[in-house]
Image (cartoon, rainbow, N blue to C red):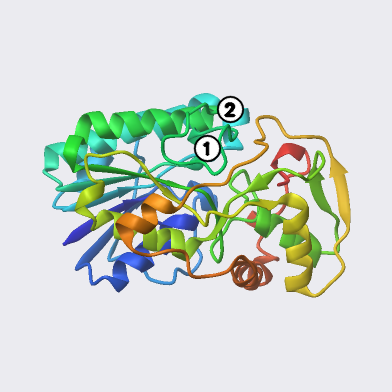
Amino acid sequence: MTALVTGGTGFLGRHVVAALRRTGVATIRVLDDLSSWGGGPVPPMPERPDELMIGDVRSGRDARAAVEGCDLVVHMAVRCVRLSLSSPAEVDQVNAAGTLEVALAARAAGASRFVYVSSSEVYGDAAIDPMGEDHPCRPTTVYGASKLAGEHYARVVMGDRCAVVRPFNAVGEGAHIGGAAGEVVPRWIARALRGRPIPVHGDGAQARDFTYAGDLARGVVLAARCDAIFGTGPLNLCSGRATTMIDLRDRIARVLDMEVATAPTPPRPGDLRRQRGSAARAAALLGREPEVPLDEAIRRCAGWVRARLDDPWEAETPDEPWRMA
């Protein structure tokens, strides 16, 4: 099998490449514009793809070249939620129109399986706890709306050859510290290691479903091999446990074995109050559940952050406080 992973050098994408490699996929190709790494170079990956194509999913020509000869397409290329607050049109073009281009190219090339990696952001705030796949979709950001549009495009174009997975919050090695793609856990770890206070937005009672990135990637790959998921509804990939921002701060302090100061900050635009996914459908269909506890995921993330603290691309952007977490 030849597999294409769009966005395969990004945080979760690099874990998916590694998970695919462990399944014995013959050839792994990645299409990426390297934007999440400032245009490159890409930090060392746990498993290198066989082919790395530098290109843009918004380009039909790039998409067609990338999918040529591929049996499986895992579409992950994305612009992140924080960027959607400052550059909503760009986020929509990459996440929605880019998905349409890749799906059209995959159909024309005869790809047998198309896995669209969506996001828990399509749900918005929890109206039901935990959030099953039938939870209403009420996104609060352009990012969430564009990911939901991507789901529809992927299904319309690929039909029964399409599977949709919705990962919740990922934690682990390879996470972005700085820039718009920076994640809350590595940002907070970096600030603690630099002796700076952690910015807790609002009252810190906001809750998220954090899962080790390698477990999420394994779920993506298992979904790609599961016939029952294709042509059906979406599939949550999550831990099924909620962690508040205050609890997350305390966990980081324990893992780092140091005192961590807190800097109260105003609530962020579009921030969600609570998200906890239901992992029941994934457990039933995939037969596997997350294996790495959150504290271990934080420890692995901390090792990655320590090695990249001096990278200028990972510097904070203090002029845009909403990006701090």
Residue 35 or residue 145, whichever sits in front: 145
Residue displayed at 48% across by 70% down: 291
Residue displayed at 53% across by 70% down: 292
Report whether 245 appears left or right of 220: right
Report whether 256 appears left or right of 122: right
Residue 66 appearing in the image: no
Q: Secondary structure at mark 1?
A: helix
User: In the rendered structure, which amino acid carries the disc numbered 2?
Assistant: Thr
User: In the rendered structure, which amino acid carries the disc numbered 1?
Assistant: Glu
User: Mark 1 and mark 2: span between their CA atoms?
Assistant: 8 Å
In percent of width and height, residue 210 lies at 58, 55
Task: Give the quarter of the image for residue 14.
Answer: bottom left
Residue displayed at 67% across by 57% down: 185
In percent of width and height, residue 146 lies at 45, 29
Residue 114 versus residue 257 in the image, above or below: above
Residue 297 versus residue 280 in the image, above or below: below
For marks 1 and 2, the one nearer the N-term is 1
In percent of width and height, residue 110 lies at 11, 43
Label number found at residue 140: 2
Other-residue count near label 1 (Cα within 10 Å), few / some / many at <14 / 14–19 / ≥20: many
Residue displayed at 78% across by 53% down: 246
Residue 285 appearing in the image: yes
Residue 217 versus residue 306 in the image, above or below: above
Residue 255 or residue 1, whichever sits in front: 255
Task: Give the quarter of the image for residue 216.
Answer: bottom left
Label number found at residue 303: none
Q: Check contact, mark 1 vs mark 2: CB within 8 A.
A: yes
The residue at which mark 1 appears reads as 121
Could you tell me which quadrant the N terminus lies in? bottom left
Residue 223 or residue 49, whichever sits in front: 223
Task: Give the quarter of the image for residue 163.
Answer: top left
